Image (cartoon, grey):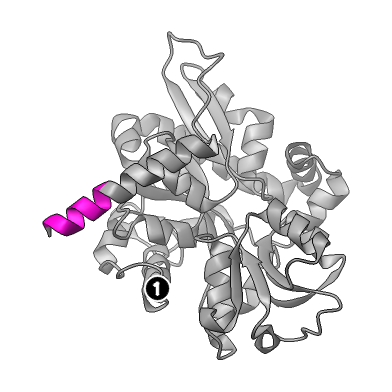
Amino acid sequence: MNNFRRLVAILSAVLVAALALAGCSVDRSGEDKSKPTIRLAYQSFPSGDLIVKNNKWLEEALPDFNIKWTKFDSGADINTAFVAKEVDFAAIGSSPVARGLSAPLNIPYQVAFVLDVAGDNEALVARNGTGINTVADLRGKRVATAFASTAHYSLLAALAQAGLTVKDVNLIDLQPQASLAAWQRGDIDAVYTWLPTLDELRKDGKTLIASRELATAGKPTLDLGVVSSAFAEKNPDAVDAWRKVQARALELIKSDPKAAAEAVAAQLGTTPEDAANQLKQGTYLTLAELTSPTWLGTENAPGNVAQNLQSAAQFLADQQQIPSAPALDVFQKAIYTRGLPDVLKQ
């Protein structure tokens, strides 16, 4: 046991060092030193989180706080930031969350929102001219994905479904933009990634399978909003305000898709038409669905997101990506349902 604890301590130190080297530490410049700061990690995939950021809804809702947004490339980087205690909230995929809640990371954070359910916005694409037409054709090929991301999880699931393992392919760890560059150079044959990079790959490639199909086969992936347990315990009203603006963004996607697309486009640096097309590829829950037993659930009755995360952790353990999957109650305790569903009412 002492050896194991020593290993965890060493791993944590390595993760913190990696965060510093990657330049992902949160910029504290320009803050009002008289106010506490809420540090949010976001990613450049189309979601309500980008709408909240673009429209400055959280700044309006919490004027007594500094609001600091920091961009991250993947869930693995965000987990590293949580280990380093550099962020309070984050938009992160379900597979990285399953990893984060498992040993050796054991990150003390909780799932407080479902941003979207992955559909056609994450997919496995093979480059034209490679002769790859099915997932089974990937044997011996160079396949890229961002390790420890939802795309990585989905790639493993797609390979298993086709009777392949990671040993049957040359698996390469690349973030979305790096994978696009490698694709354009002809260095890789296929990529499992997400929007907006995914649409660039599709221009010169063939979709082999999308996360929507894997969800139907029992391997769904989600984009989640998580909050540090320490922050939530100390600032429950701030968590409520954050959930309310995220709920407002979900409703905007459905009630005014044009306004939603314009906000997302501004954050992605693309056209509203392109952003609208990207938003159509994901699945965004209604507030009733969000707090149903299928998803978050309600106060004292966490929903099936906990089972989803445990299933993901078990799959990762079977794939030898983590040592073992925690018990279900670990994930149930990590679902933040305080005040649901009433707290989401505007």
Q: Position of residue 211 (x, y in %)?
A: 63, 71
333 or 291, which lies in front? Answer: 333
* Segment colored magenta: 2-9
Residue 217 visible in the shown view:
no
Q: Which residue is denoted by mark 1 in the rendering?
A: 311
| Residue 100, image x, y percentages | 38, 55
* Residue 199 vs residue 173, the one in the foreground: 173
Residue 219 placement (x, y as % from top left): 51, 76
**Magenta span main SS:** helix
Q: Residue furthest bottom?
A: 163
Residue at image point 46% right, 39% down: 19
Please, is residue 231 above or below residue 183 in the view?
A: above
Residue 196 belongs to the span the image colors magenta: no
Q: Quadrant of residue 189?
A: bottom right
Q: Amino acid at mark 1?
A: Ser
The reply to whether residue 58 is visible in this rendering is yes
Q: Quadrant of residue 329?
A: bottom left
**Quadrant containing the C terminus in the rendered view:** top right
Q: How many marks?
A: 1
Report x, y in % for residue 252: 68, 44
